[in-house]
Image (cartoon, rainbow, N blue to C red):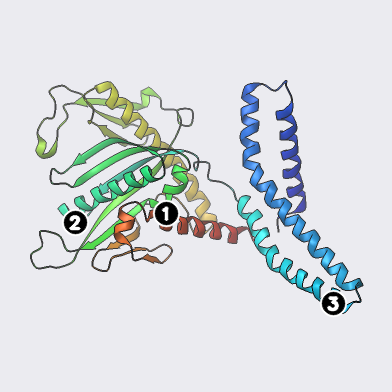
């Protein structure tokens, strides 16, 4: 169990925050900061109180067993003790779970990127389905889904698409979606009825605030050109498309959906900041991975994470060996929570095992 001293310090800090917020001389900025920390500590302190109450009750039951001579009272004390002993590990684990180090990016909004992979037109159609799945999932959770870029094939497919998703716990929920998503099904154009395997890549990047990532103008090469649509045709007659190259890293971002060069540049800078922020996070995660064998939430897209098998109606997440026979529900966004909840639980269990 986590040391009693640490638990005492958390309870004392909680009381101090409560007292500070009650004072009239606290500046508004400090009050907001204190209120945020107080809200974050509330479930932790409540869990500590429940755990300690159970420990005290268990000690009382042990004392009664030692001192009580009446067989009936001893039986009642033993029954109560057994119940408390069964409950205590769950309460202890709840405290540990609440005290797990948080990913600093969990509270951030996210930039979603979906790209067609191997499989030609079928891969592009699947990429479009995935993009719609996340759009519907965002709608179900009350998040705002803003399309930044959507490069379609003209046949209902998607070459690549980007969206900004805003809301509560966006990155915390979606960060496990990064990776290669594979689909197995019979394409509409396949006369022989053979099952084809195609793939799309998904990247979910935390969207940083401007203060999180400083982008120096001298590190950027900005090119403007005329936007083009499917088949290469020009979609407008002005040089409004923007390509930004971050010279130190070589990261390139292109935006051409807006008719305004200014708007395209603003969107491109948002995506660039997200990619730079994620690159820094990935570097830190790689350092941690040297000390721990498994890297969680790195956004590594080289690994196949999930298979959508239409003939069998199943979705399998290979990281946790979970299979759901509800493919249409998942692709409609409604069944995605079951997969994400399982991934979050597995991540917590892995991190708990590391500190035990």
**For the residues bearing labels 3 and 1, Cβ distance under 8 angstroms:** no
Residue at position x 18%, y 26% in the image: 225
- How packed mark 1 is, by other alpha carbons closer than 10 Å (few <14, some 14-19, many 20 or more), is some
- Along the line of sight, the residue nearer the viewer: 194 or 228: 194
Give whichever of discs 3 and 1 has the lower sequence position.
3
Q: Which residue is mark 2?
A: 119
Sequence-wise, the earlier of marks 2 and 3 is: 3
Q: Position of residue 222 (x, y in %)?
A: 28, 25
Q: Secondary structure at mark 3?
A: helix
Residue at 15% from the left image edge and 21% from the top image edge: 238
CA–CA distance in space, label 2 to label 3: 73 Å
Mark pair 3, 1: CA separation: 49 Å
- Tell whether 234 sits left or right of 77: left
Q: Out of 225 and 315, give the one closest to the viewer.
A: 315
Residue 72's label in the rendered image is 3
Residue 45: image x %, image y %? Answer: 70, 47
At horizontal 26% and vertical 33% (from top left) the residue drawn is: 254
Q: Earlier in the sequence, mark 2 or mark 1?
A: 2
In the displayed structure, 13 sits above or below 234; it is below
> Mark 2 to mark 1: distance in Å?
28 Å
Residue at the disc numbered 1: 337
Residue 221, image x and y in percent? 30, 26
Closer to the camera: disc 3 or disc 1?
A: 3
* Residue 156 falls left or right of residue 273: left
Q: Residue at x 72, y 34 (%)?
A: 18
Q: Residue furthest front?
A: 72
**Side of 159 relative to 57 (left or right):** left
Camera-side mark, 2 or 3: 3
């Amino acid at each position: 169990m986590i040391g009693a001293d640490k638990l005492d310090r958390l309870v004392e800090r909680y009381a101090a925050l409560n007292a500070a917020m009650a004072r009239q001389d606290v500046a508004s900025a400090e009050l907001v900061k204190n209120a945020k920390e107080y809200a974050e500590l509330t479930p932790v302190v409540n869990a500590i109180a429940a755990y300690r109450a159970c420990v005290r009750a268990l000690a009382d039951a042990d004392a009664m067993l030692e001192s009580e001579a009446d067989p009936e009272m001893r039986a009642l004390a033993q029954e109560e003790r057994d119940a408390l002993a069964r409950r205590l590990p769950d309460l202890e684990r709840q405290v540990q779970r609440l005290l797990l180090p948080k990913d600093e990016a969990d509270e951030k909004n996210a930039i979603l990127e979906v790209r067609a992979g191997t499989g030609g037109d079928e891969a592009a159609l699947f990429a479009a389905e995935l993009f719609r799945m996340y759009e519907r999932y965002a709608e179900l959770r009350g998040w705002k889904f803003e399309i930044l870029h959507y490069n379609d094939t003209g046949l209902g497919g998607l070459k690549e698409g980007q969206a900004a998703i805003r809301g509560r716990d966006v990155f915390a929920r979606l960060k496990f979606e990064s990776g290669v998503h594979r689909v197995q099904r019979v394409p509409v154009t396949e006369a022989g009825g053979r099952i084809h395997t195609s793939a799309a890549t998904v990247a979910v990047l935390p969207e940083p605030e401007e203060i999180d990532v400083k982008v120096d103008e001298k590190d950027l090469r900005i090119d403007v050109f005329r936007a083009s649509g499917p088949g290469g045709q020009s979609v407008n007659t002005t040089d409004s498309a923007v390509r930004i190259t971050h010279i130190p890293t070589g990261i390139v971002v292109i935006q051409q959906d807006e008719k305004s060069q200014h708007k395209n540049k603003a969107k491109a800078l948002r995506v660039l900041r997200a990619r730079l922020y994620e690159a820094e996070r990935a570097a830190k995660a790689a350092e941690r991975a040297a000390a721990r064998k498994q890297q969680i939430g790195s956004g590594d897209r080289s690994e196949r994470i999930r298979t959508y098998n239409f003939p069998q109606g199943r979705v399998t997440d290979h990281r946790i060996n979970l299979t759901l026979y509800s493919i249409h529900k998942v692709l409609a966004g409604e069944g995605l929570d079951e997969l994400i909840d399982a991934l979050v639980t597995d991540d917590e269990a892995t991190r708990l095992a590391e500190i035990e």
